[in-house]
Image (tube, rainbow, N blue to C red):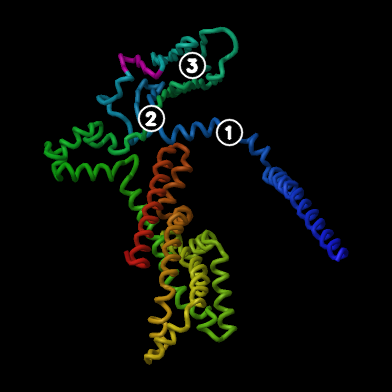
Amino acid sequence: MTAIAEDARKLALGAMRRKRAMALAAPVLLMAYFAYVFVAFDVSGLVQRAKMDNAVILLSDAVSYKIHATRDNRSDALAVSVEGSRRATYPEDRIPDWIRQDGDRTLIELTDGHSVTYDGPRISYDHPDYGPIRITIGNPILLDLPQPGPVPDFINASDARVVVTTDAGRLTVTRTRTDTFRYFWGWELFFFDLQSPFHGMSAGTLAATVAGGERLHADRPNWQAVLHDFLNNSIWRHGDVFFAIGETALMAFLGTFGAAAIALPLAFLAAQNFTPSRWLRFAVRRVFDFVRGVDALIFTIILSRAFGPGPMTGALAILITDSGSFGKLFSEALENTDQKQIEGVQSTGANALQRYRFGVIPQVMPLLLSQLLYFLESNTRSATIIGAIVGGGIGLMLTQAIQTTADWEKVTYYMVLIVLLVIAMDALSGWLRRRLIKGD
């Protein structure tokens, strides 16, 4: 009895030592893993390469815009435009009141007491905390600072170019062009561009005009004119954006439901209780493994080379990949069906197709619909990336806006629309799930 107790005590001590060793080893392994990640992912180099100033500029551009006051130094012609776009150039009678012209002299009032003056070949930037900065256009460009000493950090000067950058705005002077811009919060010309008669109207004035005001377009009532000018906004292109959103949703819809239609009959061939042939099951399952093992982006690139770009190519890529995923999920659901219900239907004299229709499908339909609706929601996000590759949907417009590096507010706009589309798909799938599965 003593020997047995001693053995039990030794076993307990051994178990305690192993548990203590594992408890000590876990933090060491975790630290080793993080050290490996730090070295393998070059975290230190990433921190050194990070450009937080650029990040701040991008975030600022995403929620603000700038108006440019540009002068041609050769002809003294002044142009005022939003984001420097020719499509958003103010006519002379609608130039903002913070830009005032007096002959060849132009005064531009910025924020916090900053101002810029164009006066022939002489440009001045009045900085309330530093003093007036004088610039004379010539060869070379001359810079006259109000204080002796080195050039401050907010001024970048050379013989051919002078740039003054402050929180109030930015002044760029070259031999041929002088450009000053001022930031404003919001998205510029979001509802109506400068060509629309509704631009600049307050909400109350716009509502009164739509309700019973004088027609501003002879060929259509005001409410139609408002909708037309909004959708055909030359800056934001709302009509094209909404069409692209529809393409993205259609890619996800066609790809998901097409994959389900193909995978369901093939799933019977992969289910053990419906296909006795082991080799046939093996072949069908390997096909499922192949098509779901290759990412949809790879199929997108292959199909775009074969069939050319377009939203249909993206839908086919989703269809191929999801056929394998649905095939695996559907076959597993079929293998878990209750054989007694099938036998009950068979006892009525039903043929094989009727047994599947009334004895199998009702059992697996809730699970199949739940998986189908989940994939539809997920593919809505995937269709955005696929659209960027095949040249269709909102993904293409998002990629183009990012590549220009000028219209980051449009990037924000497209991202908001994508999130709203995903939310709408989630709400739709939830409603369908309640209606079709729970019967609410």
Q: Amino acid at mark 1?
A: Lys
The residue positioned farthest toward the front in the image shown: 1
- Give 399 or 367, whichever is nearer the viewer: 367
Left/right placement of residue 93 relative to residue 318 reads left
Q: Give the labeled residue for mark 2.
A: 185
Q: Is residue 102 magenta?
A: yes
- Give 343 or 197, whichever is nearer the viewer: 343
Disc 3: CA contacts within 10 A as few (<14), some (14-19) or many (>=20) = some
Among numbered discs 1 and 2, the one appearing first in the sequence: 1
Whether residue 211 is visible: yes
Q: Give the labeled residue for mark 3.
A: 138
Quadrant housing residue 203: top left
Q: Give the labeled residue for mark 1.
A: 51
**Residue visible at 28% across and 38% down in the picture:** 192
Query: From which residue to which does the magenta span run?
Result: 100-111
Q: Give the Cα separation between the discs numbered 1 and 2.
A: 23 Å
Q: Where in the figure is residue 232, as x and y percent of width and height?
A: 28, 44
Report if the CB atoms under discs 1 and 2 are less than 8 Å apart: no
Q: Where in the figure is residue 394, as x and y percent of width and height?
A: 40, 51
**Residue visible at 59% across and 79% down in the picture:** 282
Q: Give the Cα separation between the discs numbered 2 and 3.
A: 35 Å
Left/right placement of residue 112 relative to residue 39 reads left
Q: Give the Cα separation between the discs numbered 1 and 3.
A: 34 Å
Q: Where in the figure is residue 260, as x and y percent of width and height?
A: 44, 70
**Which disc, if any, is residue 145?**
none
**Residue visible at 47% across and 80% down in the picture:** 338
Among numbered discs 2 and 3, the one appearing first in the sequence: 3
**Residue visible at 33% across and 64% down in the picture:** 435
Q: Where in the figure is residue 384, as x and y percent of width and height?
A: 45, 53
Q: Amino acid at mark 3?
A: Gly
